[in-house]
Image (cartoon, helix red, strand yellow):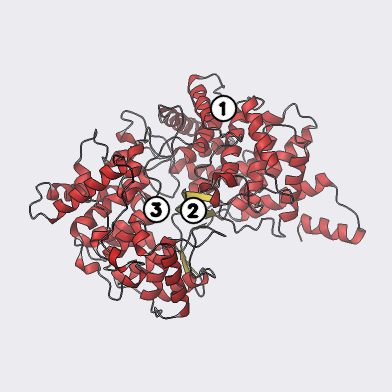
Amino acid sequence: MSRVDHLRASIESAGAEPDPQERLSDAIEQGVSWLLEQQAEEGYWCGELKADTTLESDYILYLHVLGQVESVPKLANYIRMRQLPDGGWNVYEGGPSELNPTVKAYLGLKLAGDSPDALHLLKARQCIHERGGLERTNSFTRFYLALVGAVGWDLVPAVPPELMILPSWFGLNIYRMSSWTRAIVVPLTILYALRPPRMVVRRARVDELFRDSHARAVVFPWDPSVVSWHNVFLVLDRLMKMYERWPWKPFRRRALEAARRWMVEHLDRSDGLAAIYPAMMNAVYALLALGHSPADPAAARAIDALARLAIEDHNTIRLQPCVSPVWDTAIAMVALRQAGLPPDAPALVKAADWLLDRQVLAPGDWHVNSPGVEPGGWAFEFRNDFYPDLDDTAFVLIALRGVAHPDRARMDEATRRGLAWLISMQNRDGGWGAFDRDNDLAILTQVPFADHNAMIDPSTADVTARVLECLAHFGRPANDPVVARGLAYLRGEQTRQGSWYGRWGVNYIYGTSGVLRAADALKIAGAEYFQRAAAWLRRVQNPDGGFGETCATYVDPERMGKGPSTPSQTAWALIGLLGSGSPIDATVERAVQYLLEGQNPTGSWHEQATTGTGFPRVFYLTYHLYRHSFPLYALACYRELMCRGDGAGVRQAVMSPF
């Protein structure tokens, strides 16, 4: 029996209230034990990463293309389990039915053998028609449908391989796209050009999903404005489709070879193309289109990498969009260190060793727009050498700073390179994006295949805040020129309510917490605009003491800060509040109470809500370790401040435990 269980038993037998400090310490101790049990033998942490059913639906199509359908029944079981009462499927927990996941689920279940006349597919079809029908789906949904013969290619926007040979100054150059779009699109250019008949799947037609049978040639609606970038790109799309029908394409062979070479080079230094599900699947399709068999070494490696994202249990199979070991490890290390683990604890040293081995020391795609910069970042996944990112790199450096590693020289060199890389990636507006520098050509968001709402990678408040927090921990003050430019960017991004938008976490609670952590680390949290942010957090606290916010805020900002309480979002709000004022505060105490009461007997917390963001409005994520690492970290921050007994050291203590 744990100390927490003993404490609860003694309370029940004595009929007395527990000592608050002892209750807090026991909760933290139990949380530390749980998190240490989750550490892999190699030293890392990696929780499950969950998304919506589009992954399972797409995987059914993919397995039919490969001719390997043994797993389809379990995938179909998982999809059926997630159907909503109105017949549709959503993109986040608790969200409404949406068109694209419902179309994909319908086709996946139809290929799995479900009759279109079965009640659940009749309800799905009605849901699709109510939301505009197949003619209103986004470009990537149409592309997959066309690839397997479910719809005609006339419904798909042009994605010609000639994109690969456009000059660097041209707006549609692939390096002006976000890194994830680039990795998704390059293999699509091969597929668009080749349109391989071998991928057509029998029984894949879904004509019944069109709402208007006369609208089957409609691709994307025109902008009502006569002159707009949207309309310009639609004209270009029509011209490219005319070009596609010409028998003579002078640049096609060269372009296809450039796309093939780019893809193969990137596959050689990652666990699947870009180590993310859609790019990995597209790469397999492209290799097959280029004549590889599934048994060929390159294709077999790509197929195996995608298969490792599957999680199978007795009745179902579900897919992860990627894996998050570097990210999860950095967060776990910071939480454990704050919770009192000594800097030379074996678990932390082992984790630091693992992270040091993951530092990316070779150029990647980011190098195209940042020539001459020394590599030194970290990627999100096990191996994704072309795509280190700023958020992971900053959090890893914060985590490593708290470890007394025996090889000090190696730690110092890794830190030097990581910090230099972070600073070099600052954008012209003073902020930082996720993967690239100055990746902000807004007109690209108007191209027909940009409707996944993530075509570019501009500065964001949450990533900028993380980088500033990291720089502060390594001695950069608020008046440092690099930091000052970052702070100016943040000030310009603050909403009138006082909050900040969260690009990579849901949503304004996440963004605001990150900025307040940065202000705390820089010792400037007393500034008026940071105090306005803290006041906003206090206003949105729920009656139960927790904080919550749903993905609906990406569609309707008026709902910011509103939603059922969750452990992870309560922890984010609590950390932000602790960095901006005294721990002796009614809002803080109620949030702490919410977390203490919500801890389960194993020492973790239960949370089903979707609190991570992939592509706002389109694709969301549930990180299974968020609900544990962040509450543990928040409670440990609170305990440290309370133990100090005054408010003088509040802002120094919260994010500076090392």
Which-is-in-front pick, marks 1 and 2? 2
**What's the residue type where badge 2 is placed?**
Tyr
Q: Which of the image's four quarters has the C terminus?
A: top right
If you read the primary sequence from the N terminus, does the residue marked by circle 3 or circle 2 appear first?
Answer: 3
Q: Is residue 644 visible?
A: yes
Residue 286's spot in the image, x, y percent? Answer: 25, 58
Give the CA separation, mark 1 to mark 3. 31 Å
Q: Which of the image's four quarters has the N terminus?
A: bottom right
If you read the primary sequence from the N terminus, does the residue marked by circle 1 or circle 2 appear first?
Answer: 1
**What's the residue type where badge 3 is placed?**
Ile
Circle 3 Cα neighbour tier, 10 Å, few/some/many (<14 / 14–19 / ≥20): many
Q: Secondary structure at mark 1?
A: helix
**In the rendered image, which residue does mark 1 sit on?**
472
Q: Secondary structure at mark 2?
A: strand
Query: Going by the image, does 253 lie left or right of 628?
Result: left
Nearest to the observer: residue 12 or residue 141: 141
**What's the residue type where badge 1 is placed?**
Ala
Query: Eyeballing the image, is 45 above or below 94?
Result: above
Query: Eyeballing the image, is 142 above or below 201?
Result: above
Q: Quadrant of residue 172?
A: top left
Nearest to the observer: residue 142 or residue 439: 142
**In the rendered image, which residue does mark 2 sit on?**
620
State yes or no: discs 1 and 2 in contact (Cβ < 8 Å): no
Query: Eyeballing the image, is 167 above or below 301?
Result: above
Query: Eyeballing the image, is 498 above or below 179?
Result: above
Q: Is residue 269 visible?
A: no
Residue 413's spot in the image, x, y percent? Answer: 45, 30
Q: Secondary structure at mark 3?
A: loop
Circle 2 Cα neighbour tier, 10 Å, few/some/many (<14 / 14–19 / ≥20): many
Which-is-in-front pick, marks 3 and 2? 2
Residue 54's spot in the image, x, y percent? Answer: 42, 62
**In the rendered image, which residue does mark 3 sit on?**
276
